[in-house]
Image (cartoon, grey):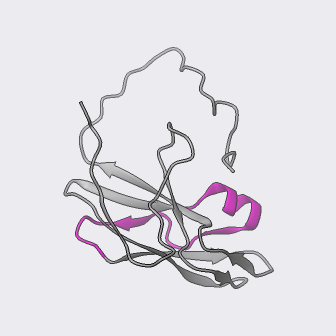
Amino acid sequence: MNNNIEIKIKLISSGGKVPSKKHASDIGYDISASENTILKSREVTLVSTGISINLPQQCAGFVLPRSGLSTKHKITLINSPGLIDPGYIGELLVPLINHADKDYDIKTGDRIAQLVLLNTNSIDFKIVDSLPDTSRSSGGFGSTD
């Protein structure tokens, strides 16, 4: 039985990449820049992804910062989280702000944000005494390269 949600995606530029995960257990799908961009110090820059998606009804997309960019380079999203509604099918643009004192170069293919999808189905929580160890148990905040 396949419980995956099908998301239609259109690559609208040659640098566009399908969002992907580094680890099978990750919730966020990395979103990449579709062109070289300079993030000026203390400024907001809309970074092109070269993709557009069509979310099904009852599904919301949230664009979130990458913890490595924020902690190592002081780069984050100005409107975090950015909400993608099911009816929006334009290009995904990521508004990054560079809080650092120097400019930062984004190259085509660099991972700049992550996409998390939320299905509006109900959730049941179960209280347990312990949780299982995972390959990322002790990695902590910003541990995915």
Residue 75 position within the rendered picture, expressed as x and y whole percent measured from the top left: 67, 69
- The magenta region covers 65-89
As drawn, the residue found furthest toward the top would be 129
The structure residue drawn at horizontal position 60% and vertical position 74%, both measured from the top left corner, is 108
Answer with left or right where residue 145 lies relative to residue 85: right
The structure residue drawn at horizontal position 46% and vertical position 58%, both measured from the top left corner, is 19
The structure residue drawn at horizontal position 50% and vertical position 38%, both measured from the top left corner, is 24
Residue 66 position within the rendered picture, expressed as x and y whole percent measured from the top left: 60, 58
Residue 43 position within the rendered picture, expressed as x and y whole percent measured from the top left: 65, 85
Residue 96 position within the rendered picture, expressed as x and y whole percent measured from the top left: 58, 75
Above or below, comparing residue 7 to residue 128 in the picture: below
Residue 80: say if magenta.
yes
| Residue 35, quarter of the rendered image | bottom right
The structure residue drawn at horizontal position 39% and vertical position 77%, both measured from the top left corner, is 12
Answer with left or right where residue 114 lies relative to residue 12: right
Residue 4: say if magenta.
no
Q: Nearer the viewer, residue 93 or 122?
A: 93
| Residue 137, quarter of the rendered image | top right
Above or below, comparing residue 38 to residue 123 in the picture: below
- Location of the N terminus (image quadrant): top left
